[in-house]
Amino acid sequence: MQIATTRDVLRNAVAALRQDGVGQGRGRIALVPTMGALHEGHLTLVRRAREEADHVVASIFVNPKQFGPNEDLDAYPRQLAEDAALLEAEGCALLWAPTVSEMYPAGFVTNISVAGVSDGLCGAARPGHFDGVATVVCKLFNQVQPDVALFGEKDYQQLAVIRAMARDLDLALPCAESIIGVPTVREADGLAMSSRNRYLSAEQRAAAAALPRAMRTAIAAIEGGADVAGALAALQAEVIAAGFASVDYAELADSTSLAPLTVLGETPARLLIAARIGGTRLIDNMAVSA
Ligand code: AMP
């Protein structure tokens, strides 16, 4: 696996992969963007990417533009050598690992803001977060020009923002239709895998399993016809009782527009939650059948 840390090296490495196609003569490329500190969720994206293309390019970049002033940018785990070994073992062809100044050279002034879908949920709790995500992902798409790109449903709102950005900006490689969402990979007790889970103490880690458990209870109630507001209130109460410090939001939303829903309608819905345990903010989401 080659590791590129400058745009020049990346461009040449991507061009070489393009020359190396199985069958058709033009290598198909799948991109898996990450912030590193890789776990089984990320590696599942890489495995799925291998099914979609001849070559997998992964990126590791802890993007300062998507962290707020009081968030965990400095504390965010960085372990490039370990991550590179994991990616290589999964058959990744190329790792794109730019520095901050390579990604945002002096004089960088552009911002991509995807209105509407960025506004609620995590966007309300983390102002500017999705602008940072959209801006860096647009740059990654232009730098690598992949045929497909894979993202986790774990970050469901992020996936919706990126799909809207690709559609609205008429991106060609990847086009909006070739942005693939991969179901959330969970620990045995149901907790969604996250690089931030390593911040949890043993006690907090045990308590955190209450989050997906309480979500499943709420979903069963909503699907069974219970009042949505009542089910969401019970969900919040259960999460707090389990040891979480606060709930940023717990919402039922339309699964495409992410518009809040007060009743379960005819179209697919999603239950989304963000809650804090100790100093760690955990997010999760699950499908709700109409
Ligand atoms: P991150 O490094 O946290 O920015 O995540 C990089 C990519 O991996 C994003 O598309 C995430 O949605 C995805 N991802 C993170 N955790 C999981 C998980 N537990 N299951 C599936 N995908 C995940």
Image (tube, rainbow, N blue to C red):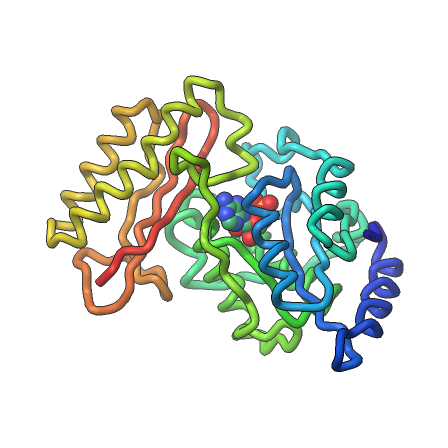
Residue nearest the observer in this picture, 181 or 255: 181
Residue 121 drawn at (x, y percent): 38, 49
Question: What x and y, as percent, mark residue 200?
Answer: 49, 24
Give the vertical position of 270 relative to 79 (above or below): below
Where 175 sits versus 259, above or below? below
Q: Nearer the viewer, residue 191 or 282?
A: 191
Coordinates of residue 50 in the picture (x, y in percent): 65, 61
Residue found 36% across the figure and 38% down from its top: 248
Any part of residue 64 in sight: no
Comparing 87 with 129, the one in front is 87
Does residue 41 show up? yes
Residue pictured at 77% horizontal, 48% vertical: 97
Front residue of 1/165: it is 1
Quick one: which residue is furthest to the bottom in this view?
24
Q: Quadrant of the C terminus?
A: bottom left
Q: Position of residue 47 (x, y in %)?
A: 61, 55
Q: Is residue 256 above or below residue 62?
A: below
**Left or right: 5 with respect to 189?**
right
How many marks are shown on the rendered structure?
0
In the image, taking residue 80 as reference, residue 217 lies left or right, namely left
Residue at 65% across, 31% down: 74
Q: Residue furthest front?
A: 23
* Residue at the image position 72 percent from the left and 68 percent from the top: 54
Whether 273 is drawn above or below 204: the answer is below
